[in-house]
Structures are given as structure tokens and as C-alpha cells.
Image (cartoon, rainbow, N blue to C red):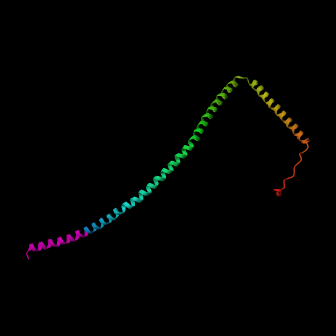
Amino acid sequence: MDLVGIGVILIGVAFIILAIYFSKVLQQVGNILQDVDKTVGELPRQLNGILDETGNLIKNSNHTLADMNTKIENLTPLFQVVGDLGESTQALTSSLVDVTSSVQQKGEHTATSEQNKKLGSIYGSAMLGYYFFKKRKESADTQYEHKPSARKLPAPDENAY
């Protein structure tokens, strides 16, 4: 055999080794593609489950939102009443502040002795009213002490019914 024959045999052996190597690689690629096929085949079922759960979540969210809207609609008049009450109390307080400041300004112009006289007369009137109230109460208490007590009726018999 000459050198050409030996070269052809070596090329043939190398070709067979390469063919075996490529066949193993292609077999592994085939296994990977089969696994990908299984995964892709299961994907629609998994997506259906996820989409069903998402639909239920959206329905529950819509029900909750509708319930909250109803409750807010029911509470809105209450908030309006509270707001109106706040505005009216603010108006009342501002008018009281105006009255107080005007009384204070008028009080600054009057003399201290005049204020003391006015206060003395107010205190005297209050004491006189308290004295009359106390005397009236004492006279009413003495009238009730002299009256004969009312006759009490016997308790009803429970077995009569």
C-alpha cells in the first residue's frame, strides 16, 4: 500500500470518529428539544390556571371596589354635615371673638372703680337670689313635713292571675 492508500484510510477513520461524535451531539440536542417540547406542551395548561386565578382576583377586586364605592357614597353626606358644622362653629367662634374684643375695648375705657361697682352689684344680686332660693326651699321642706303621709296600698297577689 502506498501512502495515498494509508492517507485515505486515515481520512476514513477520522470521518467515522467525527460521525460518531456528531451523532452523540445530535442525540443530546434531540433530547433537549424533546424536553423543550414537553415544557411548551405544558405551558398552555399552566397559563390557563394562572389566567383563571387572575380572573378571580380581578372579580374580587371589582366587588371590593364596588363595596367601597357604596360605603363612600353612604358616608359622603356625613362628611358634608361635619364640614358644615365646622364652618358654622368657625363662624360662631369668630363672632364670639369679635364680641369679646369689642367688650374688652369698651372695658378698657371704663374706670376701675366703675367696674368694681358693677361687679359688686352683680355679686350682691346673685347672693340675694341665692338667699331667696334657699328660704323658699326651706319653707317648702317644712310644708311637706306637716302633711300626713299617704296610705300605701297592699302589694298585688301573684297567684291571683
Q: 21 or 36: nearer the eye? A: 36
Please identify the quarter of the rendering in which residue 119 is found. Answer: top right
Query: Going by the image, does 135 lie left or right of 113?
Result: right
Most common secondary structure along the magenta stretch? helix
In this picture, is 25 found above or below 51? below
In this picture, is 114 found above or below 37? above
The x and y percentages for residue 65 are: 50, 48
**Number of numbered tags placed on the structure image:** 0
In this picture, is 105 found above or below 142? above
Q: Work out which residue is located at the far front of the displayed protein and give it.
A: 161
- At horizontal 15% and vertical 72% (from top left) the residue drawn is 12
Magenta residues span: 1-24
- At horizontal 83% and vertical 56% (from top left) the residue drawn is 160
| Quadrant where the image shows the C terminus | bottom right
The x and y percentages for residue 110 are: 72, 23
| Quadrant where the image shows the N terminus | bottom left
Q: Work out which residue is located at the far left of the displayed protein and give it.
A: 2
- At horizontal 36% and vertical 63% (from top left) the residue drawn is 42
- At horizontal 48% and vertical 51% (from top left) the residue drawn is 61
